[in-house]
Amino acid sequence: MRSFIEGMPKAELHVHLEGTLEPEHIFSLAQRNGIELDYKTPQDVIDAYNFHDLPSFLSIYYAAMGVLREEQDFYELAYQYFEKVATENVLYVELFFDPQAHTSRGVAFATVIDGIHRAQLDAEKNLGIQSRLIMCFLRDLSAESAMEHLEMARPYLERIVGVGLDSDEKDNPPLKFAEVFKRARELGLKLTMHCDVNQKDIVAHLWQCLNDIQVDRIDHGVNALEDEAMCDEIAQRGLGLTVCPVSNRFVVQSLTATEIRTMLQKGMKATVNSDDPAYFRAYMNDNFIALQEEGDFTRDEIVQLSRNAFEVAWIDDVQRKRFLQALDSYAADTA
Ligand code: ADE
Ligand code: ZN
């Protein structure tokens, strides 16, 4: 199963660019940008990763990204991620980025998006990996700030496929951003939002995503299983759920294998993703392999998870068919 998973064509739909910042890169960027770190070695940084919930993760995540300052920094960050997942047979990526976490430190929006975009072009040319960008708003900041950043993105709209909502979910419901997401929809952008595992009011947040915001996808969304009517609605709409097994383990001490299998059985389009792979120390293959082992998933179930990702990806049907053919041929050739 391990080698089958490693060779399988995959798409990643839930990965935060800033969550791919590896400890060694934190050190090299700190040196280049003249930034003093609290840690002496990359291993000291890893040793500090004792997350147990969303806020304890986010405080380390935001502190570390302070080393990202120049266009080249964002280029390297994105390109290194693409290089890594190209070795894992990831064919397609939808990449989140958090502009507010950079503009708030005096880094221009253009610096961030130009660096990422250049890496996307080089990754497509050199590595054959295709990608699209999802701009996330930080839900613990104001709706006004989110709207300002949507305005900032206007000159770059053809580089962005959709908007998302991340950061600390507690008391920051989807409805807080209803106007921003309505505007994003008018601008032709796809909509997704985090409904992180076991957050306060999570079932209410999920219903807001479905009924008020009318999202095109849900990030995480494991708690939908608590409501039968919600599961039916998600299955019937064919909405993708971007589940992140290893990330979940930091919060619920499980890879949520049972829940993911239940989603498949209910016809919900669950997918497997890495979330913040440098922090959770697991990229795509590690997530799939650990999940398969915990849940004793069959080959068919693993292929279905990968198929779901291509089916719910924000690509055109020609491209979708091409990716699905690659997955089907792989499954047939390795049967
Ligand atoms: N930002 C980066 N990773 C996140 C996560 N897992 N949940 C919410 N916000 C995030
Ligand atoms: Zn996430």
Image (cartoon, rainbow, N blue to C red):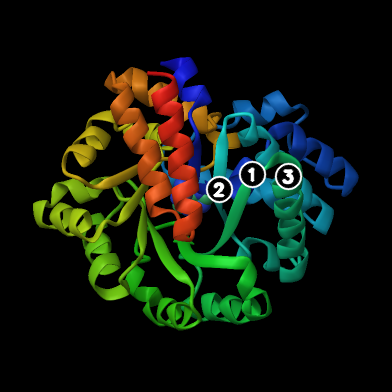
User: Do residues under tags 2 and 1 come within 8 Å of each other at their CB atoms?
Assistant: yes
The disc labelled 1 sits on which kind of residue? Answer: Ile
Rendered residue at 29%/57% (across/down): 239
First along the sequence among labels 3 and 2: 3
Picture coordinates of residue 218, whole percent (x, y): 35, 56
Q: Is residue 59 above or below residue 189?
A: above
Picture coordinates of residue 210, whole percent (x, y): 25, 66
The residue tagged 1 is 129
The disc labelled 2 sits on which kind of residue? Answer: Val
Picture coordinates of residue 285, whole percent (x, y): 50, 27
The disc labelled 3 sits on which kind of residue? Answer: Tyr
Locate residue 283: give its quadrant.
top right
Residue 93: mark: 2
Picture coordinates of residue 300, whole percent (x, y): 30, 27
In the rendered structure, the answer to whether residue 144 lies left or right of residue 232 reads: right
Separation of marks 2 and 1 at Cα, in angstroms: 8 Å
Separation of marks 3 and 1 at Cα, in angstroms: 11 Å
Q: Nearer the viewer, mark 2 or mark 1?
A: 1
Judge by depth and name the residue closer to the eye, 233 or 41. Answer: 233
Image quadrant occupied by the C terminus: top left
Rendered residue at 28%/18% (across/down): 296
Badge 1, how many Cα within 10 Å: few under 14, some, many 20+? Answer: many
Rendered residue at 47%/63% (across/down): 164
First along the sequence among labels 3 and 1: 3
The residue tagged 3 is 79
